[in-house]
Image: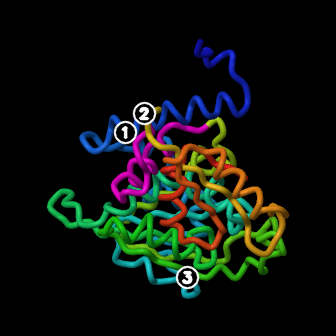
Amino acid sequence: RRRAPREMHGPSLHREVIDLLHQHAVALQPASPVVPDLTRWATFWDEQNCSRSRSCHARFRYPNQHARDCSNGTLGFHMVVDMPCQHPCEKAVFHRMESCLLPLYPLLRFARHMGGADVQGRTVSGAILLERTGFLTPDLEEMFWHSFHPTSKLLKYDDHARRGSAWNSCWNDAHNRPDVCFNLAARAVVLVPSGNARARSLIPPVVEPWLMMQSDMMQLDLYQPPRRPRDPPVVVVIQRLGGSRTFLNFTSMLAQLSRAMPRTATVTVYWGNESLRETARLFGSASIVFG
């Protein structure tokens, strides 16, 4: 008997939710793409209300308030999406995805194609602001930005308020504030992450970001439909190279695991040095993960 969600706890509940999300993502692809409700994920600023907000005015300057020490790279854009990650460990592998990319994904997805739209007889130009050494690493940028042929421009800046990162990839200054400001054109609109997009944890997951990311990964042929019971099992064995969390008797253990699997099974070792696309494709097709 399948347990009702209220009877589940911890990992069981999480797995049940993820399975349901997967089914919805498959049903939605490709007929009806997931469209974000940006009012849940972004706060909108314009020339009138930005001057009344201390945080907005400190970062963005409209005409008659332009500052010489502020960047002019944002001039000429009608829409600017600011995407800072507030987590102090945004460069760490886990937090890069769970605490930064996932809650900010609705904004990233919107920003990719906000440029080029025809609004009231004018062509809208869009830009997205990202800190150069932040959470969006080159492989994430290639997969979730360039692969979708964006019509907006990616603007990177250097935030000198951050004083380097520690051994655990967390910023040394936990209370850092960006030291960069930007001059804007008249009537430009700024989108900044709202409370939902700044959440440090999405477990249990918020539905929209998961569906959007899964839908996009399906378009890239990296996220597979659910496996059927009769499909040959695909086993992924995790063995980290040159570090902790490794199996000491790995060779004999792998041989024993292979003998225990059906002949049709595929046993693949994940070493941790694979590309992001290879990692997504491998775990997206796995029926068993051992590690």
Residue 79 located within the stretch drawn in magenta:
no
Where residue 49 sits: x, y (%)?
49, 54
Where residue 216 sits: x, y (%)?
39, 53
Residue identified by numbered label 2: 23
In this rendered view, identify the residue nearer to me: 116 or 235. 235
The span shown in magenta is: 205-228
In this rendered view, identify the residue nearer to me: 267 or 87. 267
Q: CA distance from mark 1 to mark 3?
A: 45 Å
Residue identified by numbered label 1: 26
Left or right placement of residue 29 versus residue 155 in this view: left
Q: CA distance from mark 2 to mark 1?
A: 5 Å
Residue identified by numbered label 3: 70
Left or right placement of residue 111 versus residue 244 in this view: left
The quarter of the picture where residue 115 lies is bottom left
Which residue is at 48% across, 66% downward?
277
Q: CA distance from mark 2 to mark 3?
A: 47 Å
